[in-house]
Image (tube, rainbow, N blue to C red):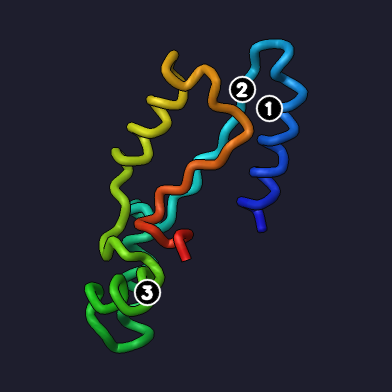
Amino acid sequence: TAKHGLEGLSKVVALEGAPHGVTSVTVNPAYVRTPLVEKQIADQARTHGISEDEVIEKIMLTRSHVKRLIEPEEVAELVLFLTGPASASMSGTSYPIDGAWTAY
């Protein structure tokens, strides 16, 4: 998948960039409340004849233990932290924001 490819690229950048002070990480959010996702929700509700809330709960977030969409600000806060001095040694890793989706 595209995310897997980006994770591989990030690891190579982390390894090859380390001697030059370059770090690289990936941030992997699940469904973020964006205009695109909102449109997908509405489309799925029409297609399946169910409410938008049911689309979110029963279709989109079936594997998420935190049954809500991720807000863009949550992703932004993580990215802000990862670009700051407290994360200077964090490199070659992946940070999911997925409501425990990947905890399975």
**Kind of residue sitting beneath label 1:** Ala
Callout count? 3
Q: CA distance from mark 3 to mark 2?
A: 34 Å
Above or below, 96 relative to 30: above
From the image, tell me which residue sits under label 1. Answer: 14
Q: Residue at x 32, y 43 (%)?
A: 72
Q: Residue at x 69, y 35 (%)?
A: 11
Q: Position of residue 42 (x, y in %)?
A: 31, 71
From the image, tell me which residue sits under label 3. Answer: 62
Camera-nearest residue between 39 and 87 = 87
Give whichever of discs 1 and 3 has the lower sequence position.
Answer: 1
Q: Residue at x 50, y 47 (%)?
A: 28
Question: Where, quadrant-wise, is the N terminus in this rendering?
Answer: bottom right
Q: Residue furthest bottom?
A: 49
Give whichever of discs 1 and 2 has the lower sequence position.
Answer: 1
Q: CA distance from mark 1 to mark 3?
A: 33 Å
Q: Secondary structure at mark 1?
A: helix
Above or below, 81 relative to 103: above
Q: CA distance from mark 1 to mark 2?
A: 5 Å
72 left or right of 28 in image: left
Say the numbered circle drawn on residue 23.
Answer: 2
Q: Are marks 1 and 2 in contact (CB under 8 Å)?
A: yes
Q: Position of residue 64 (x, y in %)?
A: 36, 65
Q: Are marks 1 and 3 in contact (CB under 8 Å)?
A: no
Give whichever of discs 3 and 2 has the lower sequence position.
Answer: 2
The residue carrying pointer 3 sits among few (fewer than 14), some (14 to 19) or many (20 or more) residues within 10 Å by Cα, namely few
Picture quadrant of residue 59: bottom left
**Kind of residue sitting beneath label 2:** Thr
**Kind of residue sitting beneath label 3:** Thr
Q: Position of residue 39 (x, y in %)?
A: 35, 64
Q: Secondary structure at mark 2?
A: loop
Camera-nearest residue between 28 and 87 = 87
